[in-house]
Amino acid sequence: MIPLSEPFLGGNEWAYLKQCLDTNWVSSAGSFVEAFERIVATYSGAGHAVAVNSGTSALHLALLLARVQANELVLLPNLTFVATANAVRYVGAQPVLIDVRPDDWQMDLDLVEEFLDKSCELQEGSCMHLPSGKRVAALLPVHVLGGMADMDRLLAIAQRWQLPLIEDAAEAVGSRWKDQHAGTLGTLGCLSFNGNKIITTGGGGMLLCRDEDLARRARHLASQAKVPGSPYYHDCTGYNYRLPNLLAALGVAQMEQLDSLLRKRQQLATTYREQLPGVQFQKTHPFCRPNHWLTTIYTHRKEAILQFLQARHIQARSLWTPIKQLPMYQECLYISRENHSQHLFEHCLSLPSSASLTESDQLRVIEAIKAALLRFSA
Ligand SMILES: Cc1ncc(COP(=O)(O)O)c(C=O)c1O
């Protein structure tokens, strides 16, 4: 089977893991945790990076740190992995789902502005949604498939409406807006290192921020809110979200290879585009340098091509079922004109994009897609 996106463990992973085992530092303390945080903070230019055990826990912490409260509203795209919406629910808040754009598949900022302009008002520094009487507490854009939402415009909207901007950059490790790394432009940013991402720690995430106090509070919340040096005194409800040293060791080894892994994904994306003329791919904003996490096509023959590829042992994948369609989110407010999220869900297909994909295997994928297109467009 040619996988969609598999880990590439071609560097110092064994050596660093062995170091953890040899020294007995396998759990949530140890030098690799700090080293991983430092390397990610430096690479991204974030200022501060707090290692956690998943991208989802990074999102949960970000919403807590942004002081999003129960029954408040958080704006996020309707087309994303479910973790984005789940994290909003973890703090008791309500997602307001925004449709995505038909070209770059990112949250539609025209709809965000229309929602804010038409139904919200700034009252004593709070953005109030007038029909529900609820406070809009944060903007939570997602950098879908490693492309990026228009950050200049989002920052302007966040400033005008005095809203914290939390970037779900789980899929965007290595993506940049102009020269700034995804997840470092807003108030807080969240990365994921789960198994199918550009780099992986098996499971893990990172919270990025500029503000030292936010980083300190994130570390505190992630370690059960234990007051340091105290006899198990905890000053609020905390979480067990720390990243074990073993996984941080993998993270350091993976970060050392990140630039070459990004080059490889870029190369794959270029080859797909060159070899499949006439096929429609995800567009990117001219200011965005994407990480090409998953090269994804738009096609009217999605299901047929998916099955055709599967029969040839090639793994391809649909985008996520839109959040609005999931049973626990059907009651959410959905801001949309043409429901592009649904349309893209029905028509988009992510192609094998692993850094380990060989030239000949990529050629096999390309030939299979060409054959499928020929067969099913007839
Ligand atoms: C957009 C998005 N947000 C959040 C997550 C959650 O990250 P994790 O799986 O590390 O919890 C993922 C991916 O897994 C994701 O794709």
Image: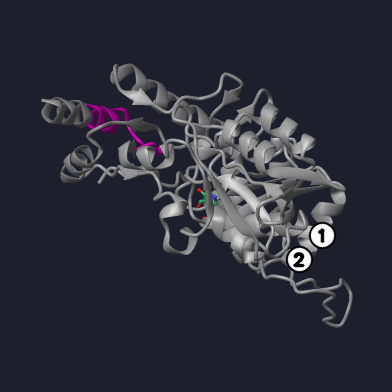
Which residue occupies the foreground of this view, 112 or 278?
112
Alpha carbon distance from label 2 to label 1: 6 Å
Query: Residue furthest toward the bottom?
Result: 231
The type of residue carrying mark 1 is Arg
User: Local crowd at mark 2 within 10 Å, few (<14), some, or many (≥20)?
Assistant: many
Q: State which quadrant residue 234 falls in.
A: bottom right
Q: Position of residue 130 (x, y in %)?
A: 70, 50
The type of residue carrying mark 2 is Leu
Q: Is residue 103 left or right of residue 63?
A: left
Quadrant that contains the C terminus: top left
Q: Is mark 1 within 8 Å of ligand 1?
A: no
Q: Is residue 345 left or right of residue 65?
A: left
Can you identify the residue that label 2 sits on? Answer: 221
Classify mark 2: helix, strand or loop.
helix
Residue appearing at x 60%, y 63% in the figure:
89
Q: State which quadrant residue 229 falls in.
A: bottom right
Which residue occupies the foreground of this view, 290 or 139?
139
Q: Position of residue 242 (x, y in %)?
A: 68, 64
Residue 165 in sight in this render:
no
Q: Position of residue 253 (x, y in %)?
A: 59, 46
* In this view, 86 is above or below 144: below
Can you identify the residue that label 1 sits on? Answer: 217
Q: How is the image coloured?
A: one colour
Q: Position of residue 197 (x, y in %)?
A: 49, 45
Magenta segment range? Answer: 352-366
Circles 2 and 1 in contact, beta carbons < 8 Å = yes
Residue appearing at x 48%, y 43% in the figure:
10
Question: Which mark identifies residue 370?
Answer: none
Classify mark 1: helix, strand or loop.
helix
